[in-house]
Image: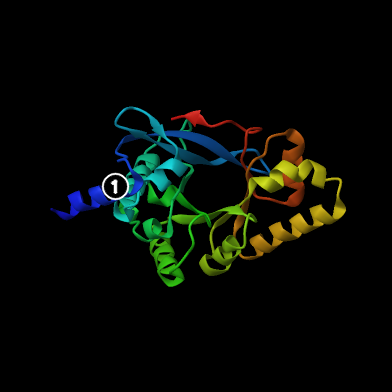
Amino acid sequence: MDDKKQRTNEWSGARGRRIEIARFTHTYQPIICASSDDVYGYEIFSAAIDLQGNRVPPDQLLSGIADDLYLCELDQRMMHSASQVRVPDAVPHKRFVNISSEINFIALTPDMFADPAHTVIELTEHFPILNWMALRERTEQLAEHGIEIAIDDFGAGHGNLQMLLELSPTYVKMDKYFAHHLESFQCMRKQMAFLRDMVDSVQSFGAKVICEGVETERCMDAVRELGADFAQGYYIARPKDA
């Protein structure tokens, strides 16, 4: 039995069924400058479509595949596909794309992206980091080609604080929790002071702060009050099909 067939049997048998992906679909959502409302970039959301034409949710895809090599291949295909998504503006903007694990990030190469100089890879603490040295080395190698790093869901757990210290990302995306509570926090002096200190601390590391989950005008006003650099959410625009 060849290696490819053996790997297929492993992940098929381990999860009880085989998930084969035919293609990917994408939506995009703008990220704007908090001070000017100008579009700075777009986050590209990707979904896998199986051979029967069914959408496979990301969590089901990740839990349904036991073979790390196959999952890595899917991740690379999905990111390459996302990097080719056409957005409405003629001027090149940053494209924020997500990676599912440390192993897949370390396997990335610049030629996987249609426009490396405008690519931002989002990392989360969803998967534990086991090899910080390899992660730093890959980050530096990608940076040589203009590829930047963003920490996603910052503040949701302790792991992404370590990412900030270890990886020196270009962007930090605040967890949606903060945006969803900003309107009530505006009436609470201590909470707003804490959040301003958090934003200042991140910016002192040279990172730009993106507030996700902005859904109201008052929330957008609070984002500006905090001194965040960028904002993203339904108040600005809902994701659109690519």
Name which residue lies at 70% across and 57% down: 199
Residue 155 in view (yes/no): yes
Residue 38, picture quadrant: top right
* Residue 57, position as x, y percentages in the image: 45, 37
Colour scheme: rainbow
Horizontal side of residue 31 vs 110, given as left or right: right
The residue lying furthest to the bottom in this view is: 133
In front of the other: 113 or 36:
113
77 lies above or below 236: below
188 lies above or below 82: below
Total number of numbered discs in the rendering: 1
Name which residue lies at 53% across and 69% down: 166
* Residue 168, position as x, y percentages in the image: 54, 65
Graded by Cα atoms within 10 Å as few (under 14), some (14 to 19) or many (20 or more), the crowding at tag 1 reads: few
Residue 86 in view (yes/no): no
Horizontal side of residue 201 vs 112, given as left or right: right
160 lies above or below 9: below
Residue 237, picture quadrant: top right
Q: Inspect the image, locate mark 1, and give the three-letter code of the amino acid beneath it.
A: Gly
Name which residue lies at 34% across and 50% down: 71
Horizontal side of residue 63 vs 234, given as left or right: left
In front of the other: 89 or 53:
53
Residue underneath mark 1: 13
* Residue 144, position as x, y percentages in the image: 40, 62
Residue 22, picture quadrant: top left
Task: Specify the quadrant that holds the C terminus.
Answer: top left
The residue lying furthest to the left in this view is: 1
* Residue 157, position as x, y percentages in the image: 62, 58
Secondary element type, mark 1: helix
